[in-house]
Structure formats: structure tokens, C-alpha cells
Amino acid sequence: MSKKINLKALSKDEISGFMEQQGLPKYRTDQLLDWLYIRYAASLDDITEFSKDLRKRLGGIACIGNLQLVKRQQSSDGTEKFLFELEDGQTIESVLIPDKDRLTLCISSQVGCAMGCRFCLTGKSGLIRNLRAWEIVEQILSVNRLIMPKKITNIVFMGMGEPLANFDEVVEALKRIISYFGISKRRITLSTSGLAPKILELPGRAPEVNLAISLNATTDAVRDRLMPINKKYPIRSLLDACGKFPLRPRRLLTFEYVLIAGVNDSVEDGSRLVRLLRGLRCKVNLIPLNPPDPHAGSDLQRPSDAAVLAFQKVLEENNMTVLIRESKGQDILAACGQLRGRYSVERAAAGRQERRG
Ligand code: SF4
């Protein structure tokens, strides 16, 4: 028997085409989209606006794909982390960050990641596969369903994976997020480790969302060590690409800078950062490294508060917009990839016990 069509994997036009093929009028397409993305139907049987016969007929050839919630954890600071299982058994995570009237969801774009950043647990597992556009979008839908009647207001692509390395699916997902959930472009941020050519490709291909660059170093020698992608696209070529990124009035690029003790947190680094970013319309987020996770096996350390403040002062004295941001949800391992890492470790341990037992 041929595999059923997953309606969530189809674009709006493809859904229209599918419904037309079934001899159904246009209003049925609108109803279907409404049930999928506004009323969160998890199966065709939920769509009570369709007659039983129609549900049965469509159910013979189509289905509604869903992510399976494996784990949900809440941090003492209100951050919530969701681990989802995909249809092929792989897992991804999404992190919900409440902040005043905002509910930001940090979503994944790949299973694993090929970039190998040294301060990141996801990077250690390597790339397993790209997410499809619907799997990216589905993270928002699944969390919206779980937190009803609240709704996610902002999206950041800072979960597992390098979004620009899964370019086509991420671009399609952006279009669907804006169209299905009505989240404005200004409330969506793509974060990249620095794929310079893809930054240049974005403006012609994707909706005008915000761009964040994970910079984390002021010399190529240090960035090469922290982020191997730098060997391919060194700081200068990355910043040149950033300079060509079109920005609407009042919008800024964001540079993320994870501060690591004795590696990139000196006052000299601060001065170099000022010089590097001169001429770019941007703000800087300083993120003191999370306390090391024993599973990450990392020797990198968080800097002292004094070092963080001294670094910030250098930037402020040079009239830069700079914020210190703490990683949220530290007690639930909410830095990218950490819950998945822990879950895999637990699962592996459980598997070992089962085999022993
Ligand atoms: S920090 Fe982001 S780009 Fe770097 S390895 Fe982790 S997931 Fe990949």
C-alpha cells in the first residue's frame, strides 16, 4: 500500500491542489487550514466540520503528521523545554522562554549539527539530518497546543542546528510561520554561526526577519578554535556579508558573544570587538557561558562577573548597544542541544540496563 500523504508536509498551494484533485471546493481548503493551524487538529477525525464520509475518504489517502512529546521540563525561572520525537525516532528540542508579555519559542532546524562549535553539546553529535519545513513549523504548533489558550509571540532559530545550512526548508518554514500563525517578521530571528554566502542569499529568498550572528571571538585564531566554520568563512568575510545585509530603518543586526573565561573575555577583546563592528548597525548580546555540563565534557569555563562587566563597559564607552543575557533554564539544561544530549545519555543508559537485565 502506498504511503499516506501528510497534509502538514504540504504548502498552502499544494493543499489547495490536493483538495481540488479530490473534487472539493475552495472553502474546504480554508476549513482544513483552519483546523490544522488554528484549531490544532491532531487527526482527520478531529475535523468535525467535515462529514464522517469525507473524513473517511480523506483518511484513506492522507493523514496529519504530529511530533510526539517525549519530555517536558520547567525551569525555576519559568523557561520550559520540550523534547519531541520525530516520525523516524530522532529527537529535537524546543525551548519556551516567557519574558514580560512575550512568549518566545527557540526552535530547532536540524537534528544534530555539523558546525561543531566547541561550547555546544549539539555540535558534538554531528549532523544527523535536516528537518523538513513542516517539522520546523510543527514545533510551534505543538507547543501552542500544549500551552493553550496562550500563544507563542516570538520565534528564534537558536535551537539545534545551523538554520542556514538547511536553507530551503528554513525559508519555506519562515513563510509558513508568518502565514499560518500571523507572527510578524519583526518577531522572528534567524541565528547563524556565520555561513557568509547564505547571509548574502537571504534577502532575495526569505522574508525580512531579524538576523543574529553568533560571533564569539575577535581574532580568527580564537574563532577557528571555538567555531570551526571560521576556517571557511573568517571574521572579515563574515562581517563583510553582514554589512551587505539590508536593514529597514530602526532595525539592527544582533551579534551574540558567548563570554568564556580566559578565551575571549579580555578588555582587549572588547576593544577589538568595537573596532570590528564599527560601521555596522548592530547591538551586542553578551552571554556568559553556562556552567559546564558534566556530559558535555567541556573544559570551557564561565568568566567572573567582574570580567563580564568590564567587557560590557568597553562596549558601552564606545556607544555600542550592549546587553548581558543569561542563558535561561540552566537547571533544565536549556542551552542548545543539552536536553537532547541528556535524553540520549539516559536512553543509552536505560538500554544498557535493559540488555543487562
Ligand atoms: S552552537 Fe549552533 S551552530 Fe554551533 S554547533 Fe551548536 S547548534 Fe550548531
Image (cartoon, rainbow, N blue to C red):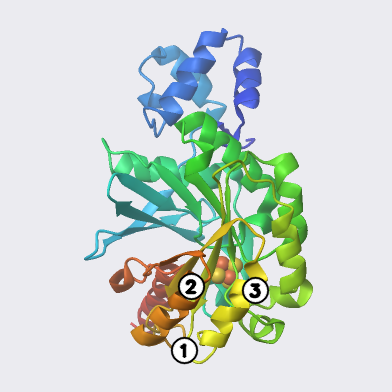
Task: Tell me how far mark 3 sits from mark 1, CA to CA.
Answer: 21 Å
Q: Which residue is mark 3?
A: 275
Q: Nearest the camera: 209 or 30?
A: 209
Q: Name the quadrant of the N terminus.
A: top right
Residue 56: image location, x then y, percent: 46, 20
Describe residue 96's horizontal placement relative to residue 170 as left or right. Answer: left
Q: Nearest the camera: 236 or 40?
A: 236
Q: Which residue is mark 1?
A: 261
Residue 48: image location, x then y, percent: 35, 18
Task: Tell me how far mark 2 sits from mark 1, CA to CA.
Answer: 22 Å
Q: Which residue is mark 2?
A: 317
Q: Name which of mark 2 and mark 1 comes first in the sequence.
A: 1
* Crowd rating for badge 1 (residues with CA inside 10 Å; few <14, some 14–19, many 20+): some
* Crowd rating for badge 3 (residues with CA inside 10 Å; few <14, some 14–19, many 20+): few
In this rendering, the answer to whether 180 lies above or below 88 is: above
Task: Tell me how far mark 3 sits from mark 2, CA to CA.
Answer: 13 Å
Describe residue 89's horizontal placement relative to residue 11 as left or right. Answer: left
